[in-house]
């Protein structure tokens, strides 16, 4: 089961407050994005990687691709103002397979086993996402006062990769662009077409590095992996 993966890495990392795109933050001496790229470069099911990057960082990413010998990078495209725009640019560059995965460059710890389970499900249903059951109670609030406690039993914390038959997710992005709809993940665009999206239970360690606290978690995950090898 082969797939192409679009990796959006064109953000600014504002919430990380690192003064640069968080993709360049080093973990164990390697940029965050290099950890993420390695997962897919080393996965035999992955046929191609398409990177969506900030226009001002194209040369940096090209140099990384060459230095890191990421030979599966088939295209480096210029991303857009929002994550959704960057993903769409990447999807338009997919050429080698009919199954497109979309994976945040800021999620370096996704496990191959979870990717393969996701790919199998998406091949079966056309759309599937990794997610983990929520562990905290969730409430809706207005102006600092609780309005409602949401039933946690049906809530999932959604991750990436998200996997789709290419025509399905391309149509979803085209429709969203025409409607001016902006979603925080790609599955929400597919849902807008009333296309069923399957959930595949993932791993709590597949974190997205978003704020400085996540670097603590990332270093702990890397230390645990080193102890296990
Ligand atoms: N215009 C954008 C915005 C985000 N992303 C990418 O989408 C992924 C998830 O986005 P997020 O974690 O929000 O990253 P940033 O947008 O960089 O973070 P922030 O919102 O704190 O600026 C990241 O790999 C990010 O690089 C992108 O390719 N293009
Ligand atoms: C796609 C995602 O990682 C799923 O949880 C998340 O929605 C990305 O949000 P961000 O604010 O663009 O990081």
Image (spheres, helix red, strand yellow):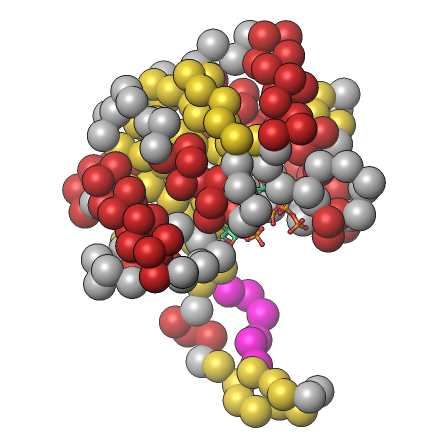
Frontmost residue, 227 versus 60: 60
Residue 209 sits in which quadrant? top right
In magenta stretch: residue 220: no
Q: Position of residue 154 (x, y in %)?
A: 39, 71
Residue 141 percent coordinates (x, y)? 61, 85
Describe residue 162's horizontal placement relative to residue 20 as left or right: left
Task: Name the quarter where the C terminus is drawn.
Answer: top right
> Which of 100 and 79 lies nearest the eye of the viewer?
79
In this orientation, does residue 131 appear? Answer: yes
Q: Residue, x 26% and y 33% (percent of image)? A: 99
Give left or right: position of 121 versus 150.
Answer: left
Residue at far front of view: 178
Image position of 14 with respect to 99: above or below: below
Q: Is residue 2 above or below residue 66?
A: below
Quarter-wise, where is residue 199 in the image? bottom left
Could you say where residue 52 lies in the image, as x and y percent from the top left?
51, 32
Magenta stretch secondary structure, dominant: loop
Q: Which residues are magenta?
A: 134-139
Find residue 178 and report its image quarter: bottom left
Q: Is residue 84 above or below residue 222?
A: below
Residue 201 in sight:
no
Which residue does the image show at 77% across and 37% down from the upper left? 20
Q: Nearer the viewer, residue 107 or 169?
A: 169
Q: Which quadrant would the N terminus be assigned to in this image?
A: top left
| x 54%, y 21%: residue | 38
């Amino acid at each position: 089961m082969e797939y192409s993966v679009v990796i959006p890495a064109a953000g600014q990392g504002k919430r990380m407050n690192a003064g640069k795109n968080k993709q360049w933050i080093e973990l164990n001496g390697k940029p965050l994005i290099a950890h993420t790229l390695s997962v897919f470069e080393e996965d035999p099911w992955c046929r191609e990687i398409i990177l969506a990057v900030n226009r001002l960082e194209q040369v940096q990413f090209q140099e990384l691709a060459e230095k890191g010998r990421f030979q599966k990078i088939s295209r480096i495209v210029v991303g857009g103002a929002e994550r959704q725009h960057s993903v769409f640019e990447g999807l338009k560059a997919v050429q080698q397979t009919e199954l497109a995965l979309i994976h945040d460059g800021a999620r370096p710890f996704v496990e191959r086993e979870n990717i393969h389970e996701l790919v199998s499900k998406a091949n079966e249903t056309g759309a599937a996402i990794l997610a983990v059951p929520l562990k905290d109670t969730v409430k809706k609030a207005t102006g600092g006062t609780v309005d409602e406690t949401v039933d946690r039993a049906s809530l999932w914390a959604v991750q990436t990769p998200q996997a789709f038959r290419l025509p399905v997710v391309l149509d979803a992005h085209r429709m969203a662009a025409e409607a001016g709809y902006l979603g925080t993940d790609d599955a929400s665009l597919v849902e807008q077409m009333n296309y069923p999206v399957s959930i595949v239970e993932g791993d709590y360690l597949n974190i997205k590095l978003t704020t400085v606290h996540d670097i603590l978690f990332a270093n702990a995950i890397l230390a645990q992996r080193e102890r296990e090898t």
